[in-house]
Amino acid sequence: MVDFPKPRIPTSPVLSLASFSSDKHQHVPSILDVGQVKFVTSGRASIALALRQMKIGKNDKVLLPAYHCIAMVEPVIEENCVPVFYKINSDTSVDLEDIHARLDNSTKLLIVVNYFGFPQNLSKIRIFCDENNILLLEDCAHSFFGEYDGRALGSFGDYAIASTVKFFPIYEGGLLVSSRHSISSLHLESAGAGFEMKAALNALEKGFEYGRLRLLQKLIYLPILLKNFIWGHIKKRVSSKNIDFGPGSSNGGPEIEEKWINKESSFFSRYMIKRASQTQIVTRRRENYLALFNALTGLPGCHPLFSGLADGVVPYVFPLFVEDPEKNFGTLKNLGIPIIRFGEFLWQSMETNICPVSTSLSKRVFQFPCHQELTPAELSWMIKEIRGVFLSNGPVE
């Protein structure tokens, strides 16, 4: 793997004074409206719990989009289910005809993703599942906020999951909800004091890393040094005992871990989700997305993946379709621009010819941050650098 420099601006929300906005909270539609909420440590843990709640297990077939991240597939494998991949269209909408052709008596569940915060045709998909007697899991990892047909995203599925770290300045977090089934009997365990401390300190240190909370950083500089010293000794002592104070998903790990599936999200993460101004999150994400859309539309060799930003859509990132990704990816990364490619690595056992669209999107869609914690200067710098790279390419032959 190429060793690129650290991003010069934060890829995801970081803790700052703006996170504690005193703006009056106006209600905005979100997955929290759907029903009872269970806060867990990651989105992949939420998927595993959803499968268990639906009693989907050994040899049951689960329909997954060919355009996916590995974290979506891991829980399906962990529960001994059979993943069956289906096609999507170039606008990321699901191909219901292809899904229908893959149904058989072993098919129990359809998982759909609201890619980048843009909802699928959820009313139509709900009808399809009801007519074919299969369950629906709505993956809202990219769509914590937003609505479709006047209903909050997450309310169409039998169950829905989300990834809170993508929308809030926290270290870990996911959630499971259901508008159709009770999850009151689902018991979650505390992950312990070490995890609670790590969740809070990691969120603080990420903010410090990108120049936020500078006064607080100066005030607690010595305690942080002491913490790092003690923490280093603790990690050395527990490493031989295979003890970890955080889920692998928060530490960049590629695999789901059984010991973290039934753990409750940290108090700090749950507090921040409750305390953060949701109105500000929605407003600033939409504003930042539109700034990127207006600045990058019409550049040679690329175009926005979506043609606009409809009312009710709260974007996770700004996805840009790039015609020659290998020519531009390294250049942008070396400038310190935070780029993510969703589905960059697809499930190895999936046949490569199942969905050429998915294979193309996994390489050609660059995701740029549009989260609420970007400063105007950071957003302006990123736009300037991206424009410079693509304008230097000139017209694509």
Image (tube, rainbow, N blue to C red):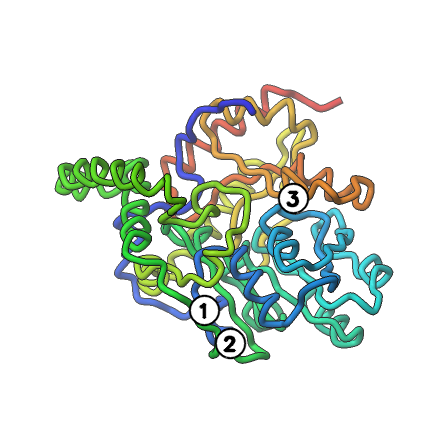
Residue nearer the viewer, 287 or 10: 10
- What is the x, y in percent for residue 331? 55, 22
For the residues labelled 2 and 1, say whether their Cβ atoms are less than 8 Å apart.
yes
Residue located 77% across and 54% down the image: 86
Q: Which residue is mark 2?
A: 183
Q: Which residue is mark 3?
A: 305
> Could you tell me which quadrant the C terminus lies in?
top right
What is the CA distance from the residue labelled 1 to the residue labelled 3? 33 Å
Q: Secondary structure at mark 1?
A: strand
Residue located 60% across and 60% down the image: 139
Residue nearer the viewer, 176 or 340: 176
- What is the x, y in percent for residue 48? 57, 61
Structural crowding at the residue carrying mark 3, measured as other residues with C-alpha within 10 Å and reported as few (<14), some (14–19) or many (≥20) = many
For the residues labelled 3 and 2, say whether their Cβ atoms are less than 8 Å apart.
no
Indicate the amino acid at tag 1.
Answer: Lys
Q: Which residue is mark 1?
A: 38
- What is the x, y in percent for residue 316? 52, 51
> In the displayed structure, does residue 123 sit left or right of residue 99?
left
Residue located 54% across and 38% down the image: 340
Residue 385 appears in view: yes
